[in-house]
Image: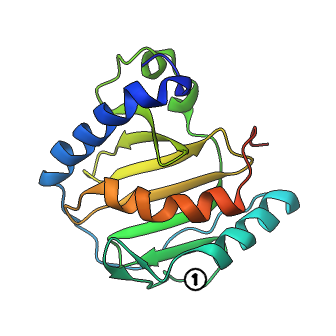
């Protein structure tokens, strides 16, 4: 589990952790407001392309975008699944403890050809951030759901709209 290159070894572990750990999650905040990122022009264009490619439903939830309306954010099922495109690199993405598999609150893995950093947040939500893509896409999952289904549903849109590479 020392890097994203070991996707096949990490994927089962990521899926198992997500399935086990999300079972106890709940959302304490029912608002549907989210901060809109402010990336540079190149990333903004990639995020607009992602917005066009996003599915109408994710993990059985209909698209229900948060306020304020933006092509850089999307949501499904109220606060259950929130996507923000063009966010900054999470500090844990370059933390050696995560790369070595020694961080109990974060791990790297891949789902259907998209690499993700999974982080458990203090409020017991899970934040997934894409890695090895030209823009960072963050997905927050609450509501005690199996996050693997969310990532599987979002993978085709991410692969279509956000090319592999290094985010600026």
Q: Visible in this render: residue 60? A: yes
Height in image: 29 above or below 65?
Answer: above
Residue 103 shown left or right of residue 18 in the figure: right
Q: Position of residue 160 (x, y in %)?
A: 68, 62
Of 134 and 36, which appears nearest the observer?
134
Query: Can you say which quadrant of the picture contains the C terminus?
Result: top right
Colouring chosen for the image of the structure: rainbow
51 relative to 97, above or below:
below
Identity of the residue drawn at 45% across and 48% down: 128
Give the quarter of the image for residue 35: bottom right
Instruction: Give the residue number, with chain letter if any, for mark 1.
Output: 68
Report the side of 99 relative to 148 (left or right). Answer: right
Query: From the viewer's perspective, is 40 left or right of 55?
Result: right
Q: Is residue 22 above or below residue 76?
A: above
Residue drawn at 29 percent across, 77 percent down: 30
Residue drawn at x 56%, y 39% is: 90
The answer to whether residue 42 is above or below residue 2 is below
Outermost right residue = 41
The residue carrying pointer 1 sits among few (fewer than 14), some (14 to 19) or many (20 or more) residues within 10 Å by Cα, namely few
Looking at the rendered structure, the number of numbered marks drawn on it comes to: 1
Residue 74: x and y in percent read: 53, 75
What is the x, y in percent for residue 23? 14, 53
Residue at 59% over, 55% down = 137
Residue 40 shows in the view: no
Residue 99 screen position, x and y as percent: 48, 19
* Quarter residue 69 falls in: bottom right
Judged left or right of residue 41, residue 86 is left
Rendering quarter of residue 31: bottom left
Classify mark 1: helix, strand or loop: loop
Q: Quadrant of the N terminus?
A: top left
């Amino acid at each position: 589990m020392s890097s994203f290159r070991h996707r096949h070894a990490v994927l089962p572990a990521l899926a198992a952790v997500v399935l086990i750990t999300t079972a106890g999650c709940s959302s304490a905040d029912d608002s549907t407001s989210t901060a809109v990122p402010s990336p540079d022009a190149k990333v903004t264009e990639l995020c607009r392309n992602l917005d066009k490619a996003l599915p109408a439903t994710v993990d059985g939830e209909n698209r229900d975008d948060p306020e304020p309306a933006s092509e850089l954010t999307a949501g499904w099922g109220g606060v259950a699944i929130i996507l923000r495109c063009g966010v900054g690199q999470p500090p844990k993405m370059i933390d050696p403890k995560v790369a070595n598999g020694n961080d109990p609150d974060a791990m790297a893995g891949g789902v259907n050809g998209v690499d993700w950093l999974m982080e458990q947040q203090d409020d017991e939500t899970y934040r997934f951030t894409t890695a090895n893509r030209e823009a960072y896409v963050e997905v927050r999952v609450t509501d005690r759901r199996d996050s693997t289904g969310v990532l599987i549903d979002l993978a085709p849109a991410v692969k279509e709209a956000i090319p592999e590479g290094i985010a600026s």
